[in-house]
Image: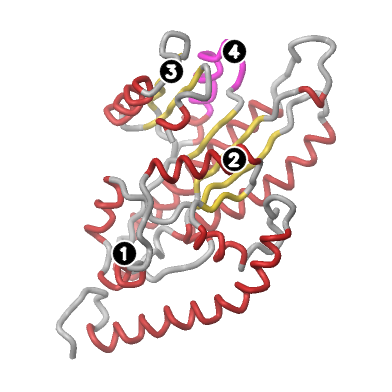
């Protein structure tokens, strides 16, 4: 995301708890900047799993941006600990919710407070609601927000909760758009990547069960750049829910419920009719594979010689 977005904003602020990773990321962003002499980049060290720190981060970013809150906030913190649920340390269950849900929820709360509760002054008295630039709050969820996979019990609930939060806020923003017409309209978006081929993915595979790897074997994965390119293109089209692969889109359409459809909603609606039936067979196939694994290799989730 950093590399792809470095050419799109005059000022960018990035927050991360790990100072070394943060500085490495900002250095990478600067190298890819379209106008390094005029663009400004700011790094903020902070623990995103703490609500007060998220408030401080937004305040710091606002001060950096000439006392104006950022117009786009993209929540992409998080990590997966893909182990079988009963084998997962209880402390890790909390860590996963903190990392994958609360970090985004706290940042969203701090951001929306800054956007909706603080006074806003248009650049000129002639400005009208139609001329105000929209603000965008972007979450990063996952394929497992739509379809559960054995071995992601510690991780998938946080991502599913994030999707629910996204839908809720999408509806709530209609209240503020109507009641506060002199403030910029707020749009909510959520990105749904599947496997991203990064260092974090390699770390996940070190704790992941062989069963989970078997269930994922048909997913070739995407590079981080592919995910960023697809995400930004969809955001620029105005999409609210953004799957980064066609397979993810197919699965997403089977569980859209009351979520906003993209575009004119026609294609997503047609796909939902097809996939509501197709997913019955997909789930059956996964269940068959899991039962067969148990018969062949036992309950550990790891590969053993066939019985």
Is disc 3 surrounded by few (<14), some (14 to 19) or many (20+) residues within 10 Å? some
Q: Which mark is residue 26?
A: none
- Circle number at residue 67: 4
In this rendering, position of residue 53 left or right of residue 129: left
Indicate yes or no whether the magenta region holds residue 60.
yes
Quote the CA–CA distance across marks 1 and 2. Answer: 32 Å
The vertical placement of 3 against 228, above or below, is: above
Viewer-nearest of discs 2 and 3 = 2
Specify few, some or many for label 1: CA neighbours under 10 Å numbering under 14, 14-19, or 20 or more: many
Asked whether disc 1 touches disc 4, contact meaning CB atoms under 8 Å apart, the reply is no
Up/down of 276 relative to 292, above or below: above
Residue sitting at 71 percent across and 29 percent down?
116
Query: Which mark sits nearer the N-terminus, 4 or 3?
Result: 3
Q: Residues within 10 Å of mark 4 (few under 14, many from 20)?
A: few
- Seen in the picture, residue 122 relative to 219 is either above or below; the reply is above
Q: Spatial distance from mark 1 to mark 3, Cα to Cα?
A: 37 Å
Q: Gap between marks 4 and 3, in whole Å?
A: 15 Å
| Coloration of the structure image | secondary structure
> Which stretch is magenta?
55-69
Question: Which residue position is annotated with label 3?
Answer: 41
Disc 1 marks which residue? 83
* Disc sitting over residue 235 in the figure: 2
Q: Is residue 1 left or right of residue 8?
A: left
Element class at badge 1: loop
Magenta part mainly helix, strand or loop? Answer: helix
Residue 233 spot, x, y in % from top left: 55, 40
């Amino acid at each position: 995301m950093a590399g792809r977005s470095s050419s799109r904003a005059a000022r960018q602020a990035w927050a991360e708890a790990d100072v070394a990773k943060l500085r490495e990321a900002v250095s990478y962003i600067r190298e890819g900047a379209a106008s390094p002499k005029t663009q400004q980049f700011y790094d903020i060290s902070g623990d995103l799993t703490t609500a007060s720190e998220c408030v401080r981060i937004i305040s710091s970013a606002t001060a950096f941006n000439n006392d104006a809150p950022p117009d786009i906030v993209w929540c992409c913190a998080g990590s997966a600990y893909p182990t079988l649920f009963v084998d997962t340390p209880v402390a890790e269950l909390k860590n996963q919710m903190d990392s994958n849900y609360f970090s985004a929820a706290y940042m969203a709360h701090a951001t929306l407070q800054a956007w909706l509760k603080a006074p806003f002054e248009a650049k000129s008295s002639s400005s009208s609601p139609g001329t105000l630039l929209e603000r965008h709050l972007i979450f990063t969820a996952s394929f497992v927000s739509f379809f559960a996979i054995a071995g992601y019990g510690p991780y998938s609930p946080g991502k599913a909760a994030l999707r629910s939060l996204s839908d809720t806020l999408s509806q709530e923003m209609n209240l503020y758009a109507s009641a506060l017409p002199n403030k910029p309209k707020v749009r909510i978006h959520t990105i749904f990547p599947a496997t991203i081929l990064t260092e974090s993915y390699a770390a996940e595979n070190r704790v992941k069960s062989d069963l989970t790897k078997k269930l994922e074997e048909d997913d070739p994965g995407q590079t981080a750049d592919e995910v960023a390119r697809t995400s930004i293109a969809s955001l620029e089209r105005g999409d609210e829910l953004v799957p980064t692969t066609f397979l993810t889109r197919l699965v997403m359409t089977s569980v859209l419920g009351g979520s906003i459809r993209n575009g004119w909603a026609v294609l997503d609606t047609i796909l939902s009719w097809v996939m509501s039936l197709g997913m019955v067979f997909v789930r059956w196939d996964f269940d068959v594979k899991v039962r067969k694994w148990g018969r062949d290799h036992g309950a550990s989730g790891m590969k053993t010689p066939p019985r």
